[in-house]
Amino acid sequence: MVTLYHWDLPQALENEYGGWESPQVIDDFVNYATYLFHAFKSKVNYWITVNEQNIFTNFGWMNGMHPPGKRNEEKLYYQVNHYVFLAHAKTVIAFKEIIPNGKIGASFAYSPSYAVDCQPVNAMAKVDYDNLKNYWWMDVYAYGRYPRNGYAYLDKKGVAPTVSQEDTAVLKKAASLIDFMGVNYYQTSVVEYNSIDGVTQSGEMNTTGKKGSGQITGEPGVYKNPPNPHLETTDWDWTIDPSGLRYACKEITSRYDLPIVISENGLGAFDEKTSENEIHDDYRIAYLNAHVYELIQAVEEGCKVWAYCTWSFTDLLSWLNGYQKRYGFVYVDRDEEGGSLDRYKKDSYYWYQEVIRTNGATITK
């Protein structure tokens, strides 16, 4: 399985015309993708067009934490997303002409939501949250259109993207051709009504691993995302909710009736290497075991899950957390100051090796 785009826009395109801010990027992306399709069509059958479009656009144009580092450029943010959708869609159409029997989709960072309680105002906030933060992307991938309620809200704010009839035709054609919904799953969200003078999207995000340092964010007058008092969190304040993966699969199955590829799932944590070069990450084993167990339940309940990919095989550089937040089965001797780059297998490596060897028979409830 190959991902065409994991946030690695060539700097030359950024310098030349602003990268994703220009519709010129659409054809350049398709040219790049079709080159790879021709080069690897005899070797690769499964392809992902774009990884976590919702994340790299939000971090790039709303909170300034990723390139190009802009903040609160809401109108531009939605227009950039529209250009990414068109690049995805035209790539899907070209793919089916070059590799007609291949499989293709996009990967979405999906955080299913729960209303904080059964008050109608909070139930309505959940609906609005899903339209703006989840279905805004998945509906385009699967249906070729934006959620009508979400678009109406953004149109009233004056920030909705400009969409031509030709754009709509392209998006709908691609939606009829995609083969699966890719999902990067890490956590669920809680949704509560947010007063008009309430919290905004610019709350502090926990990038230090100091538990409890993250702030509540939301859309004034619409929703906010308080913590879930019923669930534990990671050191980075990410909710640990294995059943949420099952929830996500069931919701996608009901709403879109598409096969699912879990393209990322894993635990970022502080790992310690002993003097014997051992890493005892029982917490990662427990996390992954619980998530795979729920995924098995989802399959038994009718979801078509084509793949489950952990994040990640080795420790690697986090965009926001450096080397302190480790995800891998293999420990890499590297931090912000340097390191030998020597690699050491963690306990989770040997555990997951058995999961693969037994095709999941070692997963426990």
Image (cartoon, rainbow, N blue to C red):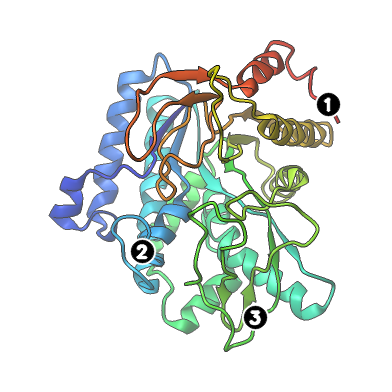
The Cα–Cα distance between marks 2 and 3, rounded to whole angstroms, is: 23 Å
Considering the numbered disc 1 on the image, is that residue within a helix, a strand or a loop?
loop
166 shown above or below 317? below
The percent position of residue 320, horizontal first and vertical second, equals 42, 50
170 shown above or below 178? below
Q: In the image, is 79 to the left or to the right of 100?
A: left
Instruction: Give the residue pinned by disc 3.
Output: 194
Instruction: Give the residue pinned by disc 2.
Output: 64
Q: Mark 2: which amino acid?
A: Gly
**Residue in the foreground of this view, choosing between 229 and 292:** 229
Which mark is on residue 104? none
301 shown above or below 164? above
Considering the numbered disc 3 on the image, is that residue within a helix, a strand or a loop?
loop
The Cα–Cα distance between marks 3 and 1, rounded to whole angstroms, is: 40 Å
Callout 3 environment at 10 Å: few (<14), some (14 to 19), or many (20+)?
A: many
Q: Quadrant of residue 166?
A: bottom left
Instruction: Give the residue pinned by disc 1.
Output: 364
Q: Mark 1: which amino acid?
A: Thr
Q: In the image, is 271 to the left or to the right of 155?
A: right
Give the residue drawn at x 43%, y 39%: 323
Give the residue drawn at x 60%, y 59%: 135
Marks 2/3 in contact by CB < 8 Å: the verdict is no
Q: Mark 3: which amino acid?
A: Asn
Q: Tell which circle, 2 or 1, labels the residue nearer the N-terminal end.
A: 2
